[in-house]
Amino acid sequence: MGKIILTGDRPTGRLHLGHFVGSLRRRVELQNSGLFDKIFIMIADAQALTDNADNPEKIRQNIIEVALDYLACGIDPTKSTIFIQSQVAELCELAFYYMNLVTVSRLQRNPTVKTEIQMRNFETSIPVGFFTYPISQASDITAFRATTVPAGEDQQPMIEQAREIARRFNGIYGETLVEPEILLPDNAACMRLPGTDGKAKMSKSLGNCIYLSDSSEEVRKRVMSMYTDPDHVRVEDPGKIEGNTVFTYLDAFCQPEHFAKYWPDYSSLDELKAHYQRGGLGDVKVKKFLYAILEELLTPIRERRKEWEKDIPAVFDILKRGSEAARAVAANTLADVRSAMRINYFDDAELIAEQARKFQG
Ligand code: TRP
């Protein structure tokens, strides 16, 4: 069995830098590494509907935004299969069978679901579909026999539940499903990139995101107004690095070669940090450095997006063909699942013969 990637995003908005460092950048590297036999990238519209049932138009509008962001970042449709979750009906059937393998209390303990329920103020009116989305996510992953799920830390509990479901299924019905592993970002800043206001996470509702498709000017404004150290009032004052968003972003994006290119006064991030901590280094200079780094990263992404935007029907065609290919793979796994569960009655000559014998006495 080969190495297979499945991962995806909910189409609730354009993708931002948090998505980029948390998973997108890694996906492109893995895609181009040649180490994987198959790569599936899913636009999780059905999952997005679990808490947007009353706003399907939002999801519908964002399918193309997410697809464009993927292509702009370098996901290559000739190497990776990009598809839309709702177009693969097999995933629902798998989820329906997996539901029997998970208890309500286990779902209630899922920390990501817990936080999301709080964030959305669902209290006692939690949609069943939302509550059970970890099970549906287990279907997404196992349908493609994914060995590897590159994702952010918040997805850890989902992967853990998928592993449990696969293990339970295999224990009861025989070895059928693959237990996936999560592939987390390799640095702490990437794991949890804060919003530009220093708040926990980038989120559209907080208005603290830098989107991959933001213009140069939008990025500049966001960087220049970033949260830093509130006690670092005068340039001479010593500054704090911890909780200083600009430095967290530098941890996530700065490479040694950026110094030679954009700020030859320093030779490493450690040196820059030490100066800031000693005092005598103003926020504006550090922000300009970060802006230069982000522009270098975002300019080609923006340009590639502009190219694809000229041919939207071609993007939909990529999604359609990807969804067809994904469906064939999921159907294959579903057939194995049905036969393991012994509900493949009409393909089971042995069952028919056995029943015939039984009734002939
Ligand atoms: N839960 C993911 C998110 O919030 C989206 C997703 C759905 C996903 N199914 C998946 C991610 C399977 C990885 C694997 O964006």
Image (spheres, helix red, strand yellow):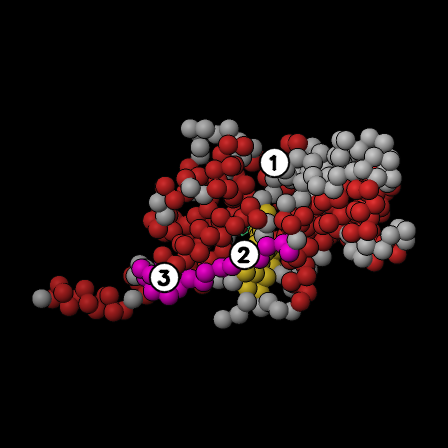
Q: In front: mark 1 or mark 2?
A: 2
Q: Answer left or right for 227 relative to 220.
A: left
Residue matched to label 3? 170
Q: Amino acid at mark 1?
A: Lys
Q: Which residue is mark 1?
A: 58
Residue pushed farthest left?
361
- Kindly identify the amino acid type of the residue bearing the numbered disc 3: Asn
Q: Nearer the viewer, residue 345 or 162?
A: 162
Q: Which residue is mark 2?
A: 182
Is the C terminus in the top left, top right, bottom left or bottom right quadrant?
Answer: bottom left
Q: Secondary structure at mark 3?
A: helix
Q: Residue furthest bottom?
A: 1
Q: Is residue 199 above or below residue 65?
A: above
Left or right placement of residue 158 versus residue 322 in this view: left
Mark 3 crowd level (few <14, some 14–19, many ≥20, 10 Å Cα) = some
Q: Choose between 42 and 160: the one closer to the eye.
A: 160
The residue lying at 54 percent from left, 56 percent from top is 182
Magenta stretch, residue numbers: 169-186
How far apart, in angstroms, are the residues tagged by discs 3 and 2?
Answer: 20 Å
Depth order, front residue of 230/311: 230
Residue 184 falls within the magenta-colored stretch:
yes
Give the label, 3 or 2, closer to the camera: 2
